[in-house]
Image (tube, rainbow, N blue to C red):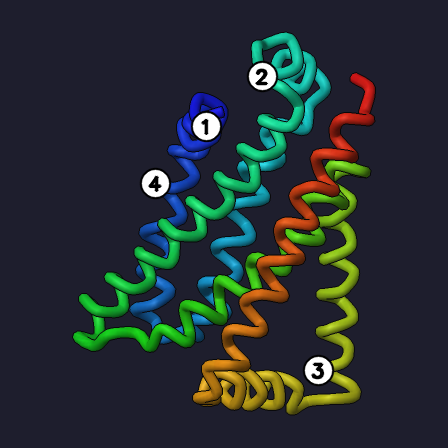
Amino acid sequence: MLHLIRKDFVLMKNVFMLMLPLLVIALYMNKSVILVGVLFCISIIMQGFSHDEKDASHLLFNSLPYTRKEIVSSKYIGACLVMCIILATIFFGHLMIYGEILPWEQLLFIAGIVFLFISFAFPFSYLFNSQYLLISFGVLFVFYLVAVNLFLPNLNDIMRSITQFVISLENYQLYFSVICVIAALYIGSWFLSIRIYCRKEF
């Protein structure tokens, strides 16, 4: 399974070389750390996922001495590693640019959002195709723009206020509970993806 994870990172080498400098530039432009982190994590993870969606790739993987469980598990483990790389880049990039340590709550918030996304996106993509997921997000983005421009012009401020409120909470028992729920969803998604992939025919 380590070879499968390594294969994903080799395929995404050019993506990392392009996206990580852009990530540092986005931090330098004083954009929202949470928004930037979530967008970069999701885009790089799904880019790596889309590499393997061709039927020829699945036929090749299933002809190699790997079980389908290992193929799916490599994606979930690889997603965690990608997220760790991006969070480390955000942490050290923020430290070098602004000379201050980024609050761990913000990094934890980014990780939570990304884990939630993966928990729903991977089973959906294994069942259907990540292309449909992209179309769905495009439609949602259009609705978002319509809502901001016509109905809720202060929606961004509301979302920013909610995010800051959640981050500013110092209830560590609440943090632990949320982490446990997200971890349970991630593990459940992992097993669901294995079940879906094992039943697919190529």
Q: Tell me the residue that label 4 is attached to.
A: 17
Q: Considering only order in the chain, which callout, 2 or 3, is on the residue closer to the N terminus?
A: 2
Check disc 2 and report its element: helix, strand or loop. Answer: loop
Q: Would residue 170 be found to the left or right of residue 151 on screen?
A: left
Tag 3: amino acid: Val
**2 or 4: tag closer to the N-terminus:** 4
Mark 3, Cα crowd under 10 Å, few <14 / some 14-19 / many 20+, is some
In the figure, 196 relative to 170: above or below? above
Q: Which residue is mark 3?
A: 148
Q: Amino acid at mark 1?
A: Leu
**SS for tag 3?**
helix
Q: Quadrant of residue 58?
A: top right
Give the distance between the C-alpha atoms of the residues marked 1 and 4, in whole angstroms: 11 Å
Q: Residues within 10 Å of mark 4 (few under 14, many from 20)?
A: few
* Mark 1, other Cα within 10 Å: few <14 / some 14–19 / many ≥20: few
At horizontal 68% and vertical 28% (from top left) the residue drawn is 53
Query: Residue 105 appears at what percent x and percent y?
Result: 41, 76
Identify the residue at horizontal 51%, vertical 81% (top origin).
173
Q: Does label 3 or label 4 sit earlier along the sequence?
A: 4
* Location of mark 1 (residue): 11
Query: What's the distance in space between the residues labelled 3 and 4, CA to CA?
Result: 34 Å
The answer to which image quadrant residue 122 occupies is top right
Three-letter residue code for mark 2 = Tyr
Pointer 2 residue:
66
- At a point 73% along the width and 44% down the height, the residue shown is 123
Callout 3–callout 2 Cβ contact below 8 Å: no
Task: Report the Cα–Cα distance between label 3 and label 2.
Answer: 48 Å
